[in-house]
Image: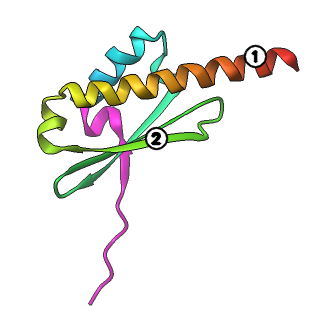
């Protein structure tokens, strides 16, 4: 019996464009640019796992699972996840900025 191949991470922008667009909409409300966040996707049988990395060197990470329905039609749960992450990202970027100024 052959082992299962490792799951491949793909860029959120290309693997789930509707989810990516929702992320951009939410993050723009927080004045966060798309380059401040690195989003990847791992496809599963029942949906996708979205992994977002942020902070100065992309050390902070958050992930969640979205169903196939949510991938094609992002709902309030998707928006809530991105608002939560945008808030954390904004706080982290501000903290990183003040650390940089002190140097």
Q: Badge 2 local density, few (<14 within 10 Å), some, or many (20+)?
A: some
Q: Is residue 54 left or right of residue 47?
A: right
Expressed as whole percent of the image width and height from the top left, the position of residue 77 reads: 24, 31
The secondary structure type at the circle numbered 2 is strand
Quarter containing the C terminus: top right
State the image quarter where residue 90 is shown: top right
Range shown magenta: 1-17
Q: Is residue 26 above or below residue 42?
A: above
Q: Residue at x 17, y 58 (%)?
A: 45
2 or 1: tag closer to the N-terminus = 2
Q: CA distance from mark 2 to mark 1?
A: 23 Å
In the image shown, does 29 or 9 lie closer to the viewer?
29
Q: Residue at x 29, y 85 (%)?
A: 2
Q: In the image, is residue 83 part of the stretch drawn in magenta?
A: no
Q: In the image, is residue 12 part of the stretch drawn in magenta?
A: yes
Q: Is residue 23 left or right of residue 45?
A: right
Q: Residue furthest right?
A: 103
Residue, disc 2? 62
State the image quarter where residue 40 is shown: top left
Task: Tell me, for residue 98, which label it has, or none.
Answer: 1
Q: Is residue 4 above or below residue 37?
A: below
């Amino acid at each position: 019996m052959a082992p299962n191949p490792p799951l491949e991470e793909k860029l959120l922008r290309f693997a789930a464009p509707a989810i990516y667009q929702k992320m951009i909409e939410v993050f723009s409300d927080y004045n966060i640019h798309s380059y401040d966040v690195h989003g990847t996707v791992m496809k599963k049988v029942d949906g996708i796992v979205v992994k977002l990395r942020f902070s100065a060197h992309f050390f902070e990470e958050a992930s969640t699972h979205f169903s196939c329905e949510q991938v094609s039609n992002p709902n309030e749960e998707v928006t809530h996840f991105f608002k939560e992450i945008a808030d954390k990202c904004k706080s982290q970027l501000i903290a990183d900025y003040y650390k940089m100024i002190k140097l």
